[in-house]
Amino acid sequence: MDTLEDEILTGEGVALSTGAAAVTHRMLSGVLDLLVYGIPAMAALYFMTGATVLANGALQRAVTIAAMVVMLVLVPALVETLSRGRSVGRLACGLRVVRDDGGPVSFRHAFIRALTGLAEIFATFGVMAMTVSLLNARSKRLGDILAGTYSMRVRGAKRALPPLQMPPHLESWARTTDITRLPDGLALTSRMFLARAATLNPDSRARLGRDLSARLAGYVSPLPEPEAHPEYLIAAVLAERGRRESSIEARRQVRARDEAARVTRLPFGIPDAAD
């Protein structure tokens, strides 16, 4: 499989591994979903058919079609939309349906997938879905191709990001500079850029580094002299930001312990029997 087929490009231009689900995992999650949706569908169909046994054949067929559409199309689409790409089977197998760009699916995506599933899964007993998935780099079935979605792995050991290192030649500057609150998106993007910098294309790495350092410069005053390398500036700002936030949190915890001790202390110097 081509490496690029298993990556998405974020809005910041950083390639992230998608971890597309294997066909076997998709089949297992599909079987579990079939049990969850299929058994209630058959039960509902049985009771509704019994309720219309005295009606004419056209009404029975209409009731049967309506029950199948509701249980096999509308209900799965609603569950997938409200759970942001999850279902009982995917939850058990550690999978999730997302858009091709990695974003959450909408009702339109879920409805297209569920509606197509009637033909490629139920009408062909899953043969069409399995064949198309085996031929696709991301194990997409026909519904995923039409909707612009795929199933990705969301369970497994998470790799910790490498710790931030303060560039030694910028440490004294970082301790005295004024750093205002960074937007969460900018801070996260900068953190991910440093973690993935070594794997990026050199031209993309240089361009992204300059762009992110220029954006960070708007929240830092004064800037280091002489002008620092973009990646050193990003690392210094993020490392100092983390150090300051850790220091603030440590002082907050000390104050909270002191306040808790004062609240439980007896007034006017009366000795506590527990002491």
Image: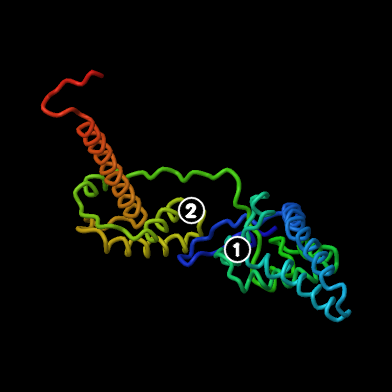
Q: Image point 50% across, 57% down: which residue?
A: 200
Q: To which quarter of the image does residue 81 belong? A: bottom right
Q: Which residue is mark 1?
A: 98
Left or right: where 229 falls relative to 71: left
How far is disc 2 from disc 1 in space, using C-alphas? Answer: 22 Å
Left or right: where 254 falls relative to 184: left
Residue in the foreground of this view, choosing between 87 and 96: 87
Residue in the foreground of this view, choosing between 9 and 83: 83
164 lies above or below 274: below
Q: Secondary structure at mark 2?
A: helix
Quarter of the picture containing the N terminus is bottom right
Q: Amino acid at mark 2?
A: Arg
Farthest residue toward the front? 54
Left or right: where 87 falls relative to 159: right
Q: Position of residue 201 (x, y in %)?
A: 51, 60
Q: Position of residue 229 (x, y in %)?
A: 33, 56
Left or right: where 250 falls relative to 188: left
Task: Check whether the beta carbons of the residues at disc 2 and disc 1 lie within 8 A of each other.
Answer: no
Farthest residue toward the left? 268
Q: Earlier in the sequence, mark 2 or mark 1?
A: 1
Q: To which quarter of the image does residue 30 belong? A: bottom right
Q: Amino acid at mark 1?
A: Val
Q: To which quarter of the image does residue 6 belong? A: bottom right
Q: Secondary structure at mark 1?
A: strand
Q: Position of residue 148 (x, y in %)?
A: 64, 71
Using a 10 Å C-alpha cutoff, classify the residue at mark 1 as few (fewer than 14 neighbours), some (14 to 19) or many (20 or more).
many
Q: Nearer the viewer, mark 2 or mark 1?
A: 1
Count of residue discs: 2
Color theme of the render: rainbow
Q: Which residue is mark 2?
A: 196
Instruction: Indicate which disc residue 141 carries.
Output: none
